[in-house]
């Protein structure tokens, strides 16, 4: 089944489809063509969604957790029934090819089902004839979920599933660049949840600001750039909202001298270029030991030449376009900066401005300076710096010399050395001889300015709850 072309996308408020006076176009980044129009929510729309979510909260949070878990699992089943439609829609609004769309849609289904098995147990800390002390988790209330454009479904699900299991109600705001899948997902599951429990509002960045300052919202679950994360936190501070912030990264990959260049090159390639490098956890700086630098670089170049870039709707495409025009302009700046400074391109470097759609070529930059923009910043596009190292302490220091700390990878045959280096990297997830392995039961979050708090695992679930201590004095005659 392909994406339906006749769907009219609507906000979902209190279980109902709601349009808006203002609309915005959504583009297919592979063609630059408009594929749909979506509502642009107003402050009044947000007020109504918050009111409905607050009204639904007491009954939803009072339901036995087993019922909420069953509903969350059923949402996963519903998504699976529509999997083909969602994969096609994801490719057309986000640009990612089929294999990545499959990874994201089936990953989202698995997340609903696995998070639905999670529960935060109530602990009994003291239990004597005189006294009982209990520690429990209570849901926070209404959650505002703010989602980016690189994984529009999965990163929404990372918020929707734990919010609903914990007993919170939720309003999802997709990125204005990729609202279709999230609006559609919210719509197709409304018969599974009571009205107001799970709403979605499409809008621009202003809607995000209204959400972070809204007094009726208890928590913001945010994934996006570090810069926006700072605004979210500042705005949420006025109402002391809880925040979970999953932000940007500048993940180092460290390649040891004992690798087989031919074997490691494809793995480094996909560590960096998966999802066309529009990946928070993409390897964004590759430190290759001097002894194998030339060989690994050359193998990377050879492998990269075999990778098919194009419209994700074509069966042989492996890498799609840049997702949106502003991002294309941002990525172009890094190409220009490399050229202006005379850095050497091992591959790529020339953007075809006449191309239909928003494409840039896979580009490898040969040993640019450590302080170059390309190394020090997060381009979030398929241009990758390759760097040399020869001293272990020095490469660790360089890997850690950044405000970010989201992820890292280390590659080598000497597992002791690989683990020794990996353990010294300041990052939320360190992958050793693998990358991009996530699990609903594996905690995920950033160190330093890559984020605050965590998603997934019971630690992530707990972020949708308050701690509550209940103390019961049982001594007879105390009060009567
Ligand atoms: P972005 O920060 O521009 O936008 C993210 C969301 O925030 C969008 O829905 C946007 O409309 C909204 N927004 C914008 N301004 C806002 C404001 N002032 N207040 C509230 N909401 C606002 O990010 P993006 O360009 O969509 O995504 C790319 C970034 O996300 C990269 O930096 C990437 O590393 C990061 N990211 C992080 C993770 C993670 O889990 N750590 C995952 C994916 C992406």
Image (tube, rainbow, N blue to C red):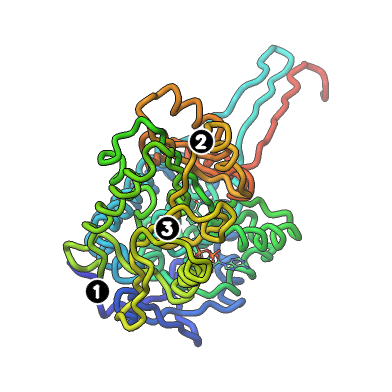
The C terminus: image quadrant = top right
Please indicate, yes or no, whether residue 300 appears anywhere in the rendered image: yes
Task: Please state if 97 lies on the left or on the right of 396 as rendered.
Answer: left
The span from disc 2 to disc 1 (Cα, nearest Å) is 37 Å
* Quadrant assignment, res 50: bottom right
Q: Position of residue 234 (x, y in %)?
A: 72, 60
The N terminus: image quadrant = bottom left
Q: Position of residue 188 (x, y in %)?
A: 33, 63
- Disc 1 crowd rating (10 Å Cα; few below 14, some 14-19, many 20+) is few
Residue picked out by circle 1:
4
The span from disc 2 to disc 3 (Cα, nearest Å) is 41 Å
Q: Is residue 479 above or below residue 160?
A: above
The residue under the point 39% across, 61% down is 345
Tag 3 secondary structure: strand
- Pointer 2 or 1: first along the chain: 1
Q: Are marks 3 and 1 in contact (CB under 8 Å)?
A: no
- Disc 2 crowd rating (10 Å Cα; few below 14, some 14-19, many 20+) is some
Residue picked out by circle 3:
365
Q: Position of residue 280 (x, y in %)?
A: 47, 53
The residue under the point 55% across, 50% down is 168
The residue under the point 40% across, 63% down is 186
Residue picked out by circle 2:
458
**Looking at this view, is 46 or 410 the one in front?**
410
Tag 1 secondary structure: loop
């Amino acid at each position: 089944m392909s994406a339906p072309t006749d769907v009219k996308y609507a906000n979902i408020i209190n279980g109902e489809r709601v349009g808006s006076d203002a609309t915005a176009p959504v583009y297919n980044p592979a063609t630059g063509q408009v594929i749909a129009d979506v509502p642009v929510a107003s402050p009044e729309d947000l007020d109504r969604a918050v009111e409905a979510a607050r009204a639904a909260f007491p009954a939803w949070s009072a339901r036995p957790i087993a019922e909420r878990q069953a509903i969350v699992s059923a949402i996963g089943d519903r998504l699976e029934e529509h999997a083909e439609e969602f994969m096609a829609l994801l490719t057309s609004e986000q640009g990612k090819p089929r294999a990545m769309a499959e990874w994201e849609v089936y990953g989202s289904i698995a997340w609903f089902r696995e998070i639905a098995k999670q529960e935060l147990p109530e602990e009994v800390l003291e239990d004597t004839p005189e006294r009982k002390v209990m520690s429990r988790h209570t849901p926070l209330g209404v959650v505002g979920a703010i989602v980016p454009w690189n994984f529009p479904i999965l990163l929404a699900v990372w918020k929707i599933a734990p919010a609903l299991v914990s007993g919170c109600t939720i309003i999802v705001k997709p990125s204005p660049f990729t609202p279709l899948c999230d609006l559609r997902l919210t719509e197709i599951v409304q018969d599974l949840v009571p009205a107001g429990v799970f709403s979605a509002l499409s809008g621009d960045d202003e809607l995000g600001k209204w959400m972070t300052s809204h007094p009726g919202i208890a928590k913001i679950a945010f994934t996006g750039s570090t810069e926006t994360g700072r605004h979210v936190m500042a705005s949420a501070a006025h109402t002391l909202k809880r925040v979970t912030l999953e932000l940007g990264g500048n993940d180092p990959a460290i390649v040891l001298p004992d690798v087989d260049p031919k074997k490691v090159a494809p793995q480094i390639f996909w560590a960096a270029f998966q999802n066309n490098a529009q990946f928070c956890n993409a390897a964004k700086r590759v430190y290759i030991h001097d002894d194998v630098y030339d060989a690994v670089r050359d193998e990377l170049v050879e492998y990269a030449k075999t990778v098919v870039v194009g419209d994700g709707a074509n069966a042989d495409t492996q890498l799609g376009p840049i997702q949106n025009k502003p991002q294309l302009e941002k990525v172009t700046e890094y190409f220009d900066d490399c050229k202006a400074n005379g850095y050497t391109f091992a591959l790529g470097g020339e953007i075809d401005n006449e191309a239909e759609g928003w494409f840039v070529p896979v580009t490898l930059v040969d040993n640019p300076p450590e302080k170059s923009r390309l190394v020090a910043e997060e381009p979030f596009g398929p241009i990758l710096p390759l760097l040399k190292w020869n001293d272990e302490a020095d490469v660790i220091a360089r890997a850690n010399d950044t405000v970010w700390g989201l992820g890292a990878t280390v590659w080598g045959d000497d597992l002791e050395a690989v683990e020794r280096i990996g353990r010294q990297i300041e990052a939320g997830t360190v992958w050793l001889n693998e990358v991009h392995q996530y699990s609903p039961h594996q905690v995920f979050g950033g160190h330093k300015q890559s984020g605050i708090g965590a998603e997934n695992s019971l630690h992530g679930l707990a972020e949708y709850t308050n701690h509550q201590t209940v103390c019961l004095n049982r001594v007879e005659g105390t009060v009567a």
